[in-house]
Structures are given as structure tokens and as C-alpha cells.
Image (cartoon, grey):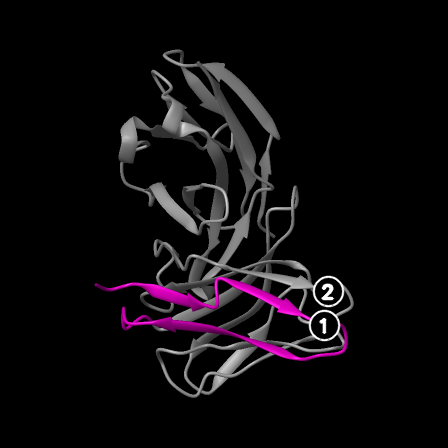
Amino acid sequence: DGGITQSPKYLFRKEGQNVTLSCEQNLNHDAMYWYRQDPGQGLRLIYYSQIVNDFQKGDIAEGYSVSREKKESFPLTVTSAQKNPTAFYLCASTPNVGLSYNEQFFGPGTRLTVL
Amino acid sequence: AQSVTQLDSHVSVSEGTPVLLRCNYSSSYSPSLFWYVQHPNKGLQLLLKYTSAATLVKGINGFEAEFKKSETSFHLTKPSAHMSDAAEYFCVVSEGNFNKFYFGSGTKLNVKP
């Protein structure tokens, strides 16, 4: 089955710890994205990548880092510098860079809770 | 700059009655517009998309939306609500060649028996 997988589904972190959220896609999509979702605020873009070994900051990149070493993988690290990391994190991908009618395909999400 | 406004944060309907979820957008380009649905603690699923072809777009599960350029609107409708339609719905605008997407703040649909 083709799709986007995110792991783990639930993640608990102690304050001061870095954690990495996994996102893998087998759709051969070029672009990948990370969003943060908080109640009543919709989705906010953290980072996105249009090609391997390249990525751009989104609207709320502070306290987060990413890498794109492989086309199919786009892990997100939540660092201790992120002051309020408790949220639902969604990974997405789109097929082709530069085509405005591309829709995004979403993973099932990871819920991160800071204890 | 692109922006999306979902005019209602919550909508409540009775099962079997029509659904209307409102979305207005601003765009510097000819926009691509999307509606997604999200059930609790799940990812987003595409309902339908507008890509400059027919202005009336049909999607999955009986939903449809009409693109009205003069009103900069892309409202989502369904003739008869089902209990399984209870979820959160997001209107999304795509920005041209940069593969960036702008999300509305979401509308939670409640369906009463």
C-alpha cells in the first residue's frame, strides 16, 4: 500500500529532552511538509522540503530542525528550545514541485506530550 | 499574499438536513482550492479540489463545492448530513509554483440525530 507513515503515534517527552518524529512516504513524492496543529488554530507550517538535501523554514520553525537525506524520509526533531511542544504533528507530501493543483497527502499524525 | 477565512468555527445540523461550510480566500494568483476533512486524532483526507476546470466540483461522500471568483468563495455543501460526517473541515489555498498551502482555521461540524 502506498502512503505516508508517521511514528510513533503517541510520544511523551520530559522537559529539556530532544525528540525525533519520523515521517516516511513511499509515494515517490518530491515535496514534504511538517505541520503543527493546536486546538482551534488550524495547521501551522514548521518546515518544508521540495527536494533532497534542501529545506525551508515555515512560519513557526523556531525550536525545530529537519533533514532530508532521502527522498522518502523527512524526520522532525523537536528540540529543548521549543518552549511549548505539546501538540499534534502532521507530515504531508505532494507529488510534483511547481504544479499548483497538487493536493497534499497526509500521514496519520503524532501526538507529542511534554510531561 | 494568500489567506483563507472559514467563516464559522462550529456548525451544527440535524441528520438528513443540508450542510453548508463557508470559505473565503484571497489570492494573487489563479488559485487552487481544496477541502479536507479530519476525524479526531487522524490525518487529513482530501474531499475535493478546484483546479480551474469546472467551477462546481464534486467530491467524495456526497460533498461538493462551488468556486465563485467574483465572491472569492469556495463553500462546501452536502444535501443531506450523515452522522459519520461529524468531523473538522479545512479549506486550503495553494500558492502557485511554490507548493505552499494556506489553511483556514477549520470548521467543526456536529451532526445531531
Check residue A46 in the rendering and tell me which mark sits there, or answer none. Answer: none
Query: Circles 2 and 1: CB distance less than 8 Å?
Result: yes
In reply to whether residue B27 is colored magenta, the answer given is: no
**What residue is rendered at 41% in x and 43% in y?**
B34
Chain for disc number 1: A
- A85 and B50: which one is in front? A85
Q: How many marks?
A: 2
Q: In terms of secondary structure, where does tag 1 sit?
A: loop
In reply to whether residue A11 is colored magenta, the answer given is: yes
Tell me the quarter of the image containing the C terminus of chain B.
top left
- Marks 2 and 1 sit apart, C-alpha to C-alpha, by 5 Å
Say whether residue B22 is visible. no
Amino acid found under the numbered disc labelled 1: Lys
From what the image shows, is residue B65 above or below residue A60?
A: above
Q: Is residue A55 left or right of residue B78?
A: right
Check residue A14 in the rendering and tell me which mark sits there, or answer none. Answer: 1
Amino acid found under the numbered disc labelled 2: Leu
- A65 and B82: which one is in front? B82
- Magenta range: A1-29
Q: Is residue B42 left or right of residue B108?
A: left
Label 2, on which residue? Answer: A115
Q: Give residue A12's position: percent from left, percent from top.
A: 63, 67
From what the image shows, is residue A31 above or below residue A66?
A: above
Question: What is the crowding at mark 2: few (fewer than 14 residues within 10 Å), some, or many (at least 20)?
Answer: few
